[in-house]
Amino acid sequence: MTFSLDGREITRARVPFSAVLDFGAVPERHTIGVVAFDRKGKELGRASRIVNEGGETFWLRLVEPREDWVNGPTRVSVDLRVPLANRVQRVVISWNDAERAVLTSPPWKTTVKIPENEVGFVRAVAELDDGRTSEDAVLLNAGSLYQSDVQLVQLPITIFGSYSSIAVREGKKERRVESIATAAETPLTVGLLIDASDSMAATLPDLQEAAIRFLDTMLGPRDRAFIISFETRAHLLQPATKDASMLRESIMRIRPEGLTSLYDAMALGLLQFEGVKGRRAMIVFTDGLDRTSEYEAKEVGDLARRVSVPVHVIGSSEEPVKRVAEMTGGTSQMLERLDDLPAIFTRIEAALRAQVLAFIRTEPAKKENEWHAVQVEVKGNGLQVYAPAGYYAGW
């Protein structure tokens, strides 16, 4: 039998058919594959299993077409992974942003007409009943002008002020911005991480009040939030929901005790965004230094870059945490007085409303999980821009 991890063969084994696989320091989503052969090398069967995939995971993949050249009636089919608590509202199939078909039930297949020799994208966008979306696209009929397996990468960019254009450069290459989604067009998922260590005893009541007010003001009908508290351990108090009463109840249940596991909480929070599309942000409040985490700052920073979620930090003086905020396009703010809390949450709210999603066209990575540093340039007068330092190509 051969064992593979994320498509790469790792080892071969004979009876008793066991293998040890290294998943790395941070619990990320992986696919384990196994193929069985007989004595002559003929394949007998294969199986795969996904590990570290949260129940909230939602994704869409275009299964076909994948050819370089297609013309006329073309079969389009998609594969979906939908959270158990949700259902698919619709899947929209388009050609060069012109809608061609709307699917509302499985099988998620249809036929669309592709104009002869026209270069363009077939795009599929799935929408859940809670407003979340996931999409995939493939470039067709490009010949030698482009690679047919280009990918679209989503960059969250916060722009204060009116802008005329967005440019993304990767080294000497300018990456084409295929589309830009504004705050009004995309749902928001926000994670709120609250320090509940002993040192928070005097601060916690004011923080709870400010956090509840922030969520009541920030979240719209399509938006969701989750709540994590942390002391010696990190706890997911409330998975992502749009139910305001459940969010308020989970925040008010927090009681101060123990030490501070800041990095464990950040890792747990970042993993909640697995498969979540649209605008995303994580807000971390802490008044102390990490004392008891199993994860280290470097591991959390690497996970933050992979997940590509803007992290907004309040109150932390730890430089690694501030660097995570900076490289993800978030913000870092100290808290001098408790009276400043409402104003800080107001600034973060303004940042979330100013966030846009820029979808850029990229080339395949030369190796899996390859980091691509980028420079984001936004044209306009008197702008304040927060952008991620790059993205991971996971294909």
Image (cartoon, helix red, strand yellow):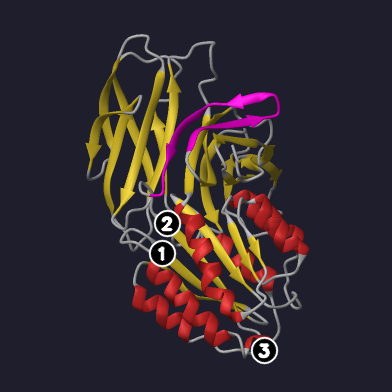
Res 57 → quadrant: bottom left
Q: Which residue is mark 1?
A: 218
State the residue in front, 147 or 44: 147
Q: Residue at (41%, 15%) from the top-left corner?
A: 119
First of labels 2, 1 by sequence position: 2
Quadrant (top left/top right/bottom left/bottom right) for the N terminus: top right
**Numbered tag placed on residue 370 in the rendering:** none
Using the numbered discs, state the Cα–Cα distance from disc 1 to disc 3 in whole angstroms: 29 Å
Q: Are marks 2 and 1 in contact (CB under 8 Å)?
A: yes
Judging by the rendered image, the residue that carries numbered circle 2 is 188
Disc 2 and disc 1: Cα gap in Å?
Answer: 9 Å
Quarter of the image holding residue 377? top right
Q: Residue 102's spot in the image, x, y percent?
A: 23, 37
The residue tagged 3 is 198
Part of the protein shown in magenta? 163-183
Q: Nearer the viewer, residue 66 or 329?
A: 329
How crowded pointer 3 is (Cα within 10 Å; few <14, some 14-19, many 20+) is rated as some
Q: Is residue 82 left or right of residue 33?
A: left
